[in-house]
Amino acid sequence: MNLKSNLFTTFLILFTWITASSQSVYKNSDLEISKLEDHVWVVETTDKTTMYIIEGKDKAMLIDTGTKCEKLDEVIRQITKKPLYVVITHAHSDHDGNIRYFKEIYLHPADTVLLDKSYKGIIHFVKDGDVFDLGGKKIEVSHMPAHTPGSIVLLDKQAGICYSGDAFGSGQVWLQLRPYAPMKTYINSCKKMEKLMDEGITKIYCGHYPYVKKAYNKQYIVEMRQLAEALVNGTAPKATPHPQKVSIGSENPMMVTLGEATIVFDQEHIKF
Ligand SMILES: [Zn+2]
Ligand SMILES: [Zn+2]
């Protein structure tokens, strides 16, 4: 291959990459849907919540249901008409906000306490290791508690992708929320995620994609774990007050940062 055709190939790859990474396929006043990977779409809402749609040969999966999205079921049908599993990564309102549009949802039982009690549909409980077979595509559940007791991530091991909800945050992991988990629980979830990344997971798509617009790699999880360990050991960088207070969180949340990773926590409720 000569220099000219090398250059052409480089251009072609770059062009494909640029167009592939910004393929908007649907938009309304609440949200925009873009193709993210082969048979994977990201749904970004105007208030920066995120859903993912994964399609197999037989079935499809919707990960989380966002906040303000009128007729979300009909919107999802614009992308796929296959029978849909609706899986909630955890029961915070920015992730289960539109479950009313769906007859059945899947959730980890430890988050039932946080779930909107007005939901009338069927709740299926998932556990660590459960596998959804979409036809030519398997999605596995992995329990990653700390952000909430029932936080799960969803793994496409064949594609090397993890959909992480808020389990490791989207730059910031919020551990200042009730019910507070011991920091040790978070460290264990990070270690579990690191192991999965050693075994072939390369990309983490987080629960608030509009803030980051990329997949995280292992380094992010390592930094999260090291930061959590430093908090336990008392060797963490100096924490500063976190500007945002939420109704289910502590009065005086603090934040501490290492590299790309920030942990938001409550000094009084930090249980080691
Ligand atoms: Zn959350
Ligand atoms: Zn969230």
Image: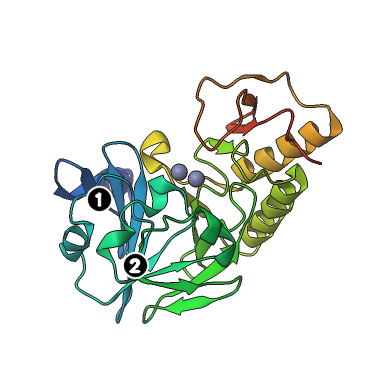
Marks 1/2 in contact by CB < 8 Å: the verdict is no
Instruction: Residue at 19% x, 47% y: name it.
Output: 24
Location of residue 33 in the rendering, given as x and y in whole percent from the top left corner: 23, 50
For residue 44, above or below residue 125: above
Image quadrant where one finds the C terminus: top right
Q: Residue at x 41, y 42 (%)?
A: 208
Q: Which amino acid does label 2 sit on?
A: Lys
- The foreground one among 272 and 135 is 272
Mark 2 lies within 8 Å of ligand 1 (Cβ measured): no
* Residue 1 shows in the view: no
Residue that badge 1 annotates: 34
In the orientation shown, which residue stands out farthest toward the front?
A: 118
Q: Provide the secondary structure element on which disc 1 rests.
A: strand
234 w.r.t. 30: above or below: above
Q: Earlier in the sequence, mark 1 or mark 2?
A: 1
Corner quadrant of residue 127: bottom right
63 vs 147, nearest the viewer: 147
Identify the image quadrant of the N terminus: bottom left
Give the percent coordinates (x, y) of residue 263.
63, 33
Q: What residue is rendered at 61% in x and 48% in y? A: 218
Classify the position of ligand 2 by quadrant: top left, top right, bottom left or bottom right.
Answer: top left
Res. 150 image quadrant = bottom right
Can residue 115 be seen here? yes
Instruction: Check disc 2 and report its element: helix, strand or loop.
Output: loop
Along the horizontal axis of the image, is 169 left or right of 13?
A: right
Q: Position of residue 246 (x, y in %)?
A: 50, 31
Q: Name the residue under label 2.
A: 120
Between disc 1 and disc 2, the foreground one is 2
In space, the residues marked 1 and 2 are separated at their CA atoms by 31 Å
Instruction: Identify residue type, mark 1.
Output: Ser
